[in-house]
Image (tube, rainbow, N blue to C red):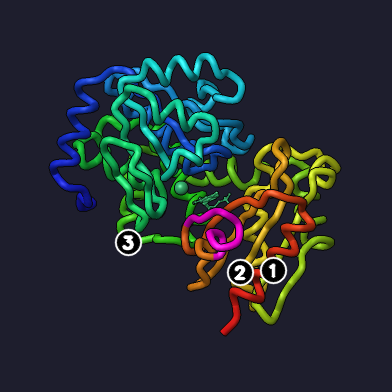
Amino acid sequence: MIKSIFSEADIERLRRIVEENSLFVLTCHAGPDGDALGSTLGLAHYLTALGKEAVVIVPDAYPDFLAWMPGSQEVVRFDKHREKAELMLAMADVILAMDYNALSRVDDMGPLIGNAKAVKVLVDHHLQPDAFCDLSFSFPQLSSTCEVVFRLVVAMGGFEVLTKAACECLYAGMMTDTGCFSYGPCTQELYIIISMLMQKEINKDRIYNKVFNNYSEGRLRMMGYVLYKKMRVFPEYRASLITLSREEMRRFDFNKGDTEGLVNIPLQMKGVYFSAFLREDTEKDLIRVSLRSQGTFPCNKFAARYFNGGGHLNASGGQYLGTLQEAIRVFEEALAEFNKP
Ligand code: 5GP
Ligand code: MN
């Protein structure tokens, strides 16, 4: 069994909140990834098994390669079904803020969550959470929000109640947030957790294939194009940069989520420890920034200083208001300045 990392008082408060309420609305950050969708759905399955009503609301679309997750078809998209989502947020007894640390990360849902009368509980692993919740489970030292969820369920004595469907969702988030257990905090206890999930007969190979061997032809060709034509390497800074314009995405029949993971690829190169990916947003007039590193290069500081963002040491993001060309220039100058001795 794994050790509880929570205070007994916090677990008791959570247990009470679960016991005394009936409508739970689970929310995650815009551009939901495997951990965001996995943690909200995983916890929703658990709450449903306890006889609660649990609704997952996401700010916008999640990628196709997550559509296999049990319960994903019932997820409410805020950008598509705003009225329904607003009603659920207003009616909720409890709102769970999962896999995000600030209301700015849920776009237009932010003020609605902030003003809702519900009890708010944060479940997350990002650094420096804002204080917008009544109860907070923030664990930046853990691999994923899914790991926090699993540990919470176990600490509340709920392991027996966890269904296979819940475990599949939770496993997916742990797998995607650690690049298949190759970076981030992959502790001994994380592997114990995986073995506990396997007790529930999850098929981890099937989950891997659903997520990683499920690309569209366009996506694979886009990867080839980006690496062949668009990747720049800066050996003196042990860094690389890839960029994509809207027009290029259109050319490859871009689907939401198709750029996910692209930023990790240049790190496979010998001598590259920092990878940046700048792309035009498909809807808004801004540039999305994704940063990844190996070792001690602080992506989060770089994102905060130059791109109005933040995140983890090895995986961060941000945005730039301006054109792609301007963002590229900012990046080049930032690279030189940041690496000054
Ligand atoms: P991605 O590159 O996948 O969009 O983001 C990687 C990580 O960077 C996210 O898990 C999140 O921790 C962080 N991140 C992305 N965008 C932002 C942002 O605008 N602000 C902050 N504080 N963190 C971000
Ligand atoms: Mn996460």
Q: Report the span colored magenta.
A: 302-311
At numbered mark 3, what does the secondary structure look like: helix, strand or loop?
Answer: helix
Q: Nearer the viewer, residue 150 or 31?
A: 31
At numbered mark 2, what does the secondary structure look like: helix, strand or loop?
Answer: strand
* Percent of width and height locating residue 196: 31, 46
Q: Nearer the viewer, residue 32 or 106?
A: 106
Q: Are marks 1 and 2 in contact (CB under 8 Å)?
A: yes
Pair 3/2: label in front: 2
Q: Name the residue that disc number 1 marks.
A: 240
Magenta region, main secondary structure: helix
The mark nearer the N terminus, 1 or 2, is 1
> Is 231 a magenta residue?
no
Q: Residues within 10 Å of mark 1 (few under 14, many from 20)?
A: many
For residue 274, the mark is 2
Eyeballing the image, is 62 above or below 321? above
* Percent of width and height locating residue 301: 51, 64
Is residue 270 in view from this perspective? Answer: no
Is residue 335 in view from this perspective? Answer: yes
* Percent of width and height locating residue 297: 52, 71
Q: Name the residue that disc number 3 marks.
A: 188
Q: Is mark 2 within 8 Å of ligand 1?
A: no
Mark 1 to mark 2 CA distance (whole Å) = 6 Å
Mark 3 to mark 1 CA distance (whole Å) = 32 Å
Q: Residues within 10 Å of mark 3 (few under 14, many from 20)?
A: few
Residue at image coords 30%, 57%: 189
Pair 3/1: label in front: 1
At numbered mark 1, what does the secondary structure look like: helix, strand or loop?
Answer: strand
For residue 249, the mark is none
126 left or right, relative to 13: right
